[in-house]
Structure formats: structure tokens, C-alpha cells
Amino acid sequence: MSKPAKRILFIVPYPLGIAPSQRFRFEQYFDLLTESGFSFSVRPFLDEQAMQILYRPGKLFLKIWKVKLGFWKRIIDLFTLHKFDVVFIHREAAPIGPPVFEFLITKVFRKKVVFDFDDAIWLSNTSASNPFITFFKRYRNAENTAAWAWKVSCGNAYLRNHAAKFNAKAIINPTTIDTENLHNQVKSFSTSRTKIGWTGTHSTMKYLHRIIPILQKLESEFDFELLVIADHNPHFDLRNYQFVAWNKSTEIDDLLKMDVGIMPLEDDRWAQGKCGFKALQYMALGIPAIVSPVGVNTEIVSHGANGWICDSDAEWEQCFRTILANPAQLPQLSTAARKTVVDRYSVVSNKNNFLELFQIG
């Protein structure tokens, strides 16, 4: 019979409560871990000040100092490994260089490692704010870590299929939504101007730019608003445009201002590794989503039932026209959208799957 590893060390890139990949892959399970008898410690590589400057131009020397500080913290972490049964590594132990810490943890200290990732991190996808990082990144790190790990936790089937080339214990652990304690409200629709919404960060803003010419064309025929919730304002040239700076404390209320949420993507190898997080956030609140047919999106969204799937620009335009001409149809899809998340992509529905990551035997 398998038994749980009760002491867990989370080695993560970012401070708690900021990065969506951490918040919705494991941070929201912390209370569940405590209730289930686990103890754990979380060790971020970067601190909050580093997060504030990392993806902005300039301050190169401060960035270098913060990275050096992160490496010192990782060295200290090595001397605490004896306190833990399992080490959970999210994405990478350090952002640059070869996987030295992953090798030491698995091969020298011989700890059981759960390697977790939710993007195609073996592919190059460096931020435009830090192009020099490309010279220090080694994208094969993910494959090495997968091979050395005890288990690999993957956000979708595309990621699992790649990881399975290196480790037979690669499983799907989807990005989930806490529908009981966080996304626990349901959109109330009104007869006012329809709000088309998008949320994300600088790294995914490029996908939204494709949609803007379509909306510019439609605004001469329909009265609607584009709401963007992000870490910086792209200043789109639209008649009715609203930007809201992302804020954790107001995130749910801001999302609920949307009538329909959009998630455009390009069908490339990087996008295929995405876990549909935007669509899940919208749908958990009863907001129907329009998504590109890339990766897991086609598993989450059923066209015309809980949202819409659009590929070409013509399909996006026609979908917008249908919605804007008849916004009364939105509440009909709202219930189905939330039910999809509650049944298949919620913390509650994934509870046992997540806890199984820490079962030894």
C-alpha cells in the first residue's frame, strides 16, 4: 500500500501570491495539504522586488544582483533537504544555466522530486525585456529534470506526451480553479453595453493584437467595450476601451465586469503547451469564452454550448457579430461554462489527483 510523503519542499521561481502558474497549480492546494496532514516549506528564487523589475527594461545591474541572490538561496536550500520527504520543483530551480541544483537534489542528495510545469518550457520563449537571458538559458533543462524526477506533473496531454519520452511517471495534473473560495461568484448579465474582456500579462499580449483590427472594424456597427486586465496598458485605439491594472485583491470583481472573455492564440508549439487558464478563469465565473482551437482549449470549450471556438479572422469576426447582435444568448451559456470548470477543472474535482503526487509506493 502506498503512503504519503508528509514533508514537502516547494522550490519555485517566484514569490507567493503573484504568478498565475504557481497560484493555480499548487498554491491554492496549500490548505488542503495542511488539512491532509502534510507540512511544507516554500523557497522562491526571486523576491518581490525582483518581480517588480524583472520584466521591465533597464536596471540591469539590480537584476544581476537579484539573480545572484537567488543562487545563494538555492545553495542554502541544499543544506535543508534532509528535512523533507519530497521536493516539488515548479518549472526550474534557477532561471539560467544548466540544471545543477536539479542534478544535486536528485542524484547527489537522492531526494524524490516531483517536477511540475505548465508550458512548453523546453522551447525558447524569452521575454523581450530581457533578450540577453537567451544566451544563459539552457532549454534542455526541462528534459533532463524530467528524466531524473520521481514523478512529472504536467498541465495537459501535450506536455505529458513530451515528458513521457523521458519519464514513464509523467501524469496530467491540470491547472485548476478554486470554485469554492475564490472564483465562487457567477456573472450577472445586464442590458447595458456588451463588454468583451481579456486578461493576461505582457508575455501573452501579442496574441490579443491580432483581434484589435477586427474590433476596430466592428465598432462602427456595434456599441461594445473592450476591457483589458493586465500588468501594463497596451493603449489600444478603440472608441470604447478600458484598461484595469491587474490586482490580486480585485481580480474577481474586475473579471466579473466582462460579458464574454477571449483567448486568441497562434497555433505554434509553444501555444499548444498552454493549459487554457484564461478560458478557465472566465468560465469559472460563468463568463462564456471565445478561444482559438489550440491545445487544451478544444477540450475545455464546446462550441455553442459553453462558449465558442474560432480559428480564422473571419470566424472571430462572425462570432463577435453573433454575440453583439444578440447578447441575450450569453446567460444561456453561463451555467454550462461554470459547470465545465466545477466538474473537470476545479480544485475539488482534482483533489485526489493532486494528493496522489505525494504518495510513495
Image (tube, rainbow, N blue to C red):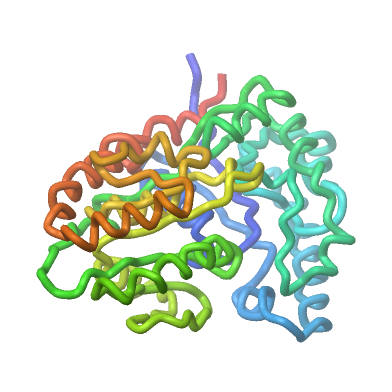
- Pick the residue in front: 100 or 84: 100
Image quadrant in which you'd find residue 343: top left
Q: Residue at x 55, y 42 (%)?
A: 7
Is 263 situated above or below 245?
A: above
Q: Residue at x 50, y 44 (%)?
A: 275
Q: Position of residue 69 (x, y in %)?
A: 78, 71
Image quadrant in which you'd find residue 61: bottom right
Is 343 situated above or below 207?
A: above
Residue at the extreme top of the image, as rendered: 1
Q: From this viewpoint, is residue 282 visible?
A: yes
Image quadrant in which you'd find residue 46: bottom right
On the picture, is 50 further left or further right than 266?
A: right
Residue at the extreme right of the image, as rendered: 135
Q: Residue at x 77, y 85 (%)?
A: 59
On the picture, is 337 further left or further right than 130?
A: left
Is 45 situated above or below 1?
A: below
Q: Position of residue 166 (x, y in %)?
A: 74, 26
Q: From this viewpoint, is residue 358 visible?
A: no
Is 268 situated above or below 166?
A: below
- Pick the residue in front: 331 or 230: 331
Disc tally is 0
Q: Residue at x 18, y 57 (%)?
A: 186
Q: Position of residue 77 (x, y in %)?
A: 73, 55
- Pick the residue in front: 137 or 227: 227
Q: Position of residue 81 (x, y in %)?
A: 70, 46
For the C terminus, the quadrant is top right
